[in-house]
Amino acid sequence: MVPGARLIVLGKQGAGKGTQCMRLSHRYVVPHISTGDMLRAAVKSRTPLGLQARRYLDAGDLIPDEVVLAMVAARLDQDDTRTRGFVLDGFPRTVAQADGFDELLKPAVIDLVLNLVVPTGLVLERLVSRRVCEDCGAIYSTSAPPKLNWSCDVCGGEVVQREDDTEEAIKNRLDLYDSSTAPLVTRYAALGKLVEVWGVGSPDEVTNSLTAVIDAYQHGGEFFPPTPTQARPPAGRRELRELPLGAGEQS
């Protein structure tokens, strides 16, 4: 992925976006921008934005578009995103956010949108069992805990269940995804930017599927599944633009 690439990873919460975005960020040396992480950091620090956002996060509701757009605009103004590009995790979540984001990016545009597809039942199971390090954000689960006393293997921080990972809040988020976020799939497919990737399998298998799409896109042409775990996107969503990543400038 060349410098300046702009990538979005969509998918329901629990589809593995966070882990896969971190892996893509490391592989291609581009910033990983997670609006969820940014909001939770603001809540923990009790900033004005954090206090405003907490009541939405605790209920599993979406943060108002104007609040999220202002936060993203400030992050995109930093030098690393200007020179390296970025991989966006958890944003945009609504068509209104996508429209506002297009305005923020001008004259540049998003290069590629990857949609991780995972069955809803598996998403719910993953989120209920998820545990997260309060300090560094490393992800664990009740079936794959840290090695010692729920202390993070990476930084030693406390590993906890997020307040918004209750079953009630999760079901609310999934309902919101269906009504507010799923239309983004249609939007980006119509723009010829979307490829759907099967998100069930080991983390390495899913990463391989994602990087195969990105590498195929970078070289132009059509993507075909390299492994049995890769879902072939529906008709009308498989064509990749014959442009290298980072070349999507508007005239």
Image (cartoon, grey):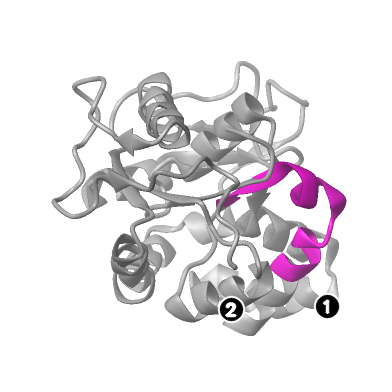
Which x, y percent locates residue 34? 63, 52
Instruction: Give the mark count.
Output: 2
Name the residue located 54 percent from the left edge and 62 percent from the top edge.
91
Residue at the spot 45% in from the left edge and 58% down from the top edge:
166
Residue 208's quadrant in the figure?
top left
Say which of 248 and 24 sits in front: 248
Residue with the mark numbered 2: 100
Q: Kindly state the secondary structure of the residue where label 1 is placed.
A: helix
- State the extent of the magenta-drawn residues as a range: 72-88
Q: Quadrant of residue 225?
A: top left
Instruction: Give left or right: position of 134 versus 18.
Output: right
The amino acid pointed to by label 2 is Gly
Query: Is residue 205 visible in this depiction of the protein?
Result: yes
Say if residue 64 shows up in the picture. no
Q: Is the magenta stretch mostly helix, strand or loop?
A: helix
Q: Which residue sits at x=84%, y=56%?
A: 78
